[in-house]
Image: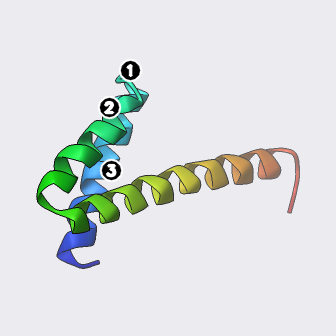
Amino acid sequence: MDFLEQVADELASDVLEAIENGADEDLIMGVKKIAGETSTTLEEAYMTAVRVRRAERRARAYLARFLAQGGG
């Protein structure tokens, strides 16, 4: 993982954790706006990381349900 991806992923992880702990969903777009004011590259990488992390969570939840129902 290069530096940009690492920074974006850590930022996305922190934002999603804050949302899980009660922060408003608008936090995602607020951070996107602030990052984009200085670096559109970071803005794009951050939003990609948010989407990837959310997709992973949905996929893992599906897998857990599948396995719990005896799938395999």
Query: Residue 59 versus residue 26: which sits nearer the camera?
Result: 26
Number of residues whose C-alpha sits closer than 10 Å to that of mark 3, classed few (under 14), some (14–19) or many (20 or more):
many
Number of residues whose C-alpha sits closer than 10 Å to that of mark 1, classed few (under 14), some (14–19) or many (20 or more):
few
Q: Quadrant of the N terminus?
A: bottom left
Is 11 left or right of 47, judged from the image as shown? left
Q: Say which residue label 2 marks.
A: 18
The amino acid beneath tag 2 is: Ala
The percent coordinates of residue 6 (x first, y second) are 24, 67
Q: Say which residue label 3 marks.
A: 12
Per the model, the C-alpha gap separating discs 2 and 1 is 6 Å
The percent coordinates of residue 64 (x first, y second) are 71, 48
Label 1 near label 2: C-beta < 8 Å? yes
Query: Residue 60 versus residue 29: which sits nearer the camera?
Result: 29
Asked which secondary structure carries label 3, the reply is: helix
The amino acid beneath tag 1 is: Gly
Whichever of labels 3 and 2 marks the residue nearer the N terminus, that label is 3
Q: Is residue 66 above or below residue 8?
A: above
Is 20 left or right of 8, judged from the image as shown? right
Q: Residue furthest left?
A: 38
Q: Say which residue label 1 marks.
A: 22
Residue 15, quarter of the rendered image: top left
Asked which secondary structure carries label 2, the reply is: helix
**Color style of the picture:** rainbow
Q: Quadrant of the C terminus?
A: bottom right
Is 68 left or right of 20, judged from the image as shown? right
Q: Residue furthest front?
A: 37
The percent coordinates of residue 26 (x first, y second) are 37, 30
